[in-house]
Amino acid sequence: MNLALNWIGFQTLVRKEFIRVIRIWVQTIVPPAITMTLYFIIFGNLIGRRIGSMDGFDYMQYIAPGLIMMSVITNSYGNVVSSFFGAKFGRHIEEMIVSPMSNVTIILGHVAGGVIRGLLVGSLVTVVALAFTSLKVEHPFVTISIILLSSVVFSLAGFINAVFAKKFDDISIVPTFVLTPLTYLGGVFYSISLLPVFWQKVSLANPILYMVNAFRYGILGVSDIRIGYAYAIIGLFVAGLFGLSLMLMNRGTGIRE
């Protein structure tokens, strides 16, 4: 009976998140696509002509997987942090807590919403990318699994940010000062083989590097890091962030305070 109630609760949360994303699609889906189009025009078309090829691929083709991954990461994160903080701010998080839903279901429901928005935006950005360059998926399983796992990681990260946030300004600090720098330094626009040895080693501490390169391997078949390492790092982040999210929910951090 409890399992059935949690399943109904999960479906309800996912439906709510999906409707929320679609209802305000002009704010949730269109802006990222426009931003990525500008990236393709400026970095890929204009600057790319001067750069030439990278790892044997046209520069625009090389950065396309990174830009797709960047859009998935930022939108998965942004959807969950705004949705869950909105539930706290509107006080209807209390209704979820007193309902028969478990904390696991509450977390999974919001994460699923983040994944949905991330994949919707990622799909649209892929369509935009195909208007500028050609992409052939070399390893479909790697491509799909990495994009899903990466979306889950940053959906969980957005959930944790929302748990600690006390005002709307708090949900923009991490994206601005942490997420954006890590994304730009995560190999989206370049191969880390171009960096000095010291900075190559420093770059290995950036988790987004593994996601971008694994996704690029899935599409183009080239990567700066071993795919096995990428799966291990991403898997550790999924487990760690989910465990932290569940612990915070069980303690009532940021909710019952």
Image (cartoon, rainbow, N blue to C red):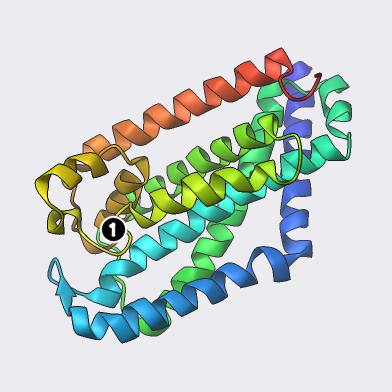
Q: Identify which residue is drawn at 29% across, 49% down.
A: 214
- The residue closer to the viewer here, 73 or 113, is 73
Quadrant location of the C terminus in the rendered image: top right
50 sits to left or right of 36: left
Where residue 38 sits: x, y (%)?
47, 79
66 sits to left or right of 150: left
Where residue 238 sits: x, y (%)?
46, 31
Residue 115 can be seen, yes or no: no
Write down the quadrant of residue 105 in the picture.
Answer: top right
Dot 1: element: helix
Up-down relation of residue 138 to residue 88 (above or below)? below
- The residue closer to the viewer here, 74 or 230, is 74
- The residue closer to the viewer here, 89 or 4, is 89
Q: Identify which residue is drawn at 71% across, 30% down.
A: 106
Where residue 120 sits: x, y (%)?
58, 61
Quadrant location of the N terminus in the rendered image: top right
55 sits to left or right of 219: left
176 sits to left or right of 44: right
Residue 257 can be seen, yes or no: yes
Up-down relation of residue 107 to residue 45 (above or below)? above
Mark 1 surroundings within 10 Å by alpha-carbon count, few (fewer than 14), some (14 through 19), many (20 or more): many
Q: Identify which residue is drawn at 36% across, 61% down.
A: 66
Where residue 155 sits: x, y (%)?
57, 41
Count the numbered circles shown.
1
- The residue closer to the viewer here, 191 or 235, is 191
Residue closest to the far top = 251
Q: Which residue is mark 1?
A: 216
Q: Amino acid at mark 1?
A: Arg
